[in-house]
Image (cartoon, rainbow, N blue to C red):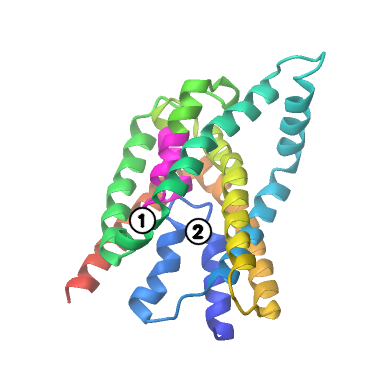
Amino acid sequence: MSILEIIILALIQGFTEFLPISSSAHLILPSQILGWEDQGLAFDVAVHVGTLIAVVIYFRKEVADILSAWFKSFGAQGTTDDSKLGWWIILGTVPAALLGLLLKDVVELYLRSAWVIAATTIIFGLLLWYADAKGKQMKTIYQLNWKTALLIGFAQAVAMIPGTSRSGITMTAGLMLGMNKQSAARFSFLLAIPIISMMGLYYTIELALGDHVVDWSTLILGVVLSFLSAYACIFMFLKVIERMGMLPFVIYRLLLGVGLIVFLTL
């Protein structure tokens, strides 16, 4: 890959991983539309590591509180709001982890196309608009229960389909289940930590077992750029939804989806 491709793809991963607009779609599109070569497994690992570091550092206090409470819940302290949240994050991760392993090859073979991305971008964009407009938005992140966590987890599994957006579909589910915008977004971001960790581990094992040439300078640049862009993205996103809701991202998804359809039919 050229330096320009590395910069663009790393920034795309960082900016889109946590926005409700689908990072996988934006990473697939350059190869589908511009004819760029696949960025390779090692680069996938690098940009996922960058975004993982960003979300862990941004939510470091919440992560520390949840982990501490979760481990202490096995002792005399017992169950707290934070320890329950830890269990709900684990529960919400299970569907995507299992279905990801079972259906990964099917998705790679049949669903990684610009037409699928165009359709899912529009469909799930409209669902996000509906959830934002009609959801009661009264519950906080600590009012989740095992049923809502599991439902959001199954929603996260749907994000295997390119163009869906992992953050978008989990926020949509959270809003439909009555969570307020900040809580839906924060639970989505916290839910990203184990799933991105598992993806990164899976890719790392594939990389270690395969015969891949590793360009360390490319990987380091990918990690740094994806980290910086992802951290900035999380900060800006939480500010934007407080003032404007999900509408800007819905409009973007609809414009992108329609634009793709026009491009593909020309």
Does residue 160 lie above or below 226 as drawn?
above
Which residue lies most toward the left here? 265
* Residue named by callout 2: 16
Check the image and report above or below for 69 versus 184. Answer: above
Kindly tell me whether residue 229 is visible in this rendering.
no
Question: In the image, is residue 154 part of the stretch drawn in magenta?
Answer: yes
Secondary structure category for the residue under label 1? helix
The x and y percentages for residue 56 are: 70, 48
Instruction: Looking at the picture, tell me which residue is in the foreground, 210 or 161.
Output: 210
Residue 241 appears in view: yes
Q: Which mark is residue 107?
A: 1
Report the span colored magenta: 153-173
Residue 241 image offset from top left, x and y in percent: 50, 43
Residue at 61 percent of width and 56 percent of height: 200
Quarter of the picture holding the C terminus: bottom left
Q: Earlier in the sequence, mark 1 or mark 2?
A: 2
Nearer to the camera, 67 or 54? 67
Residue name at image x 76 percent, y 19 percent:
74
Residue toward you, 260 or 241: 260
The type of residue carrying mark 2 is Thr
- Secondary structure character of the magenta stretch overall: helix
Q: Position of residue 236 (x, y in %)?
A: 58, 52
Per the image, label 2 sits on a secondary structure element best described as helix
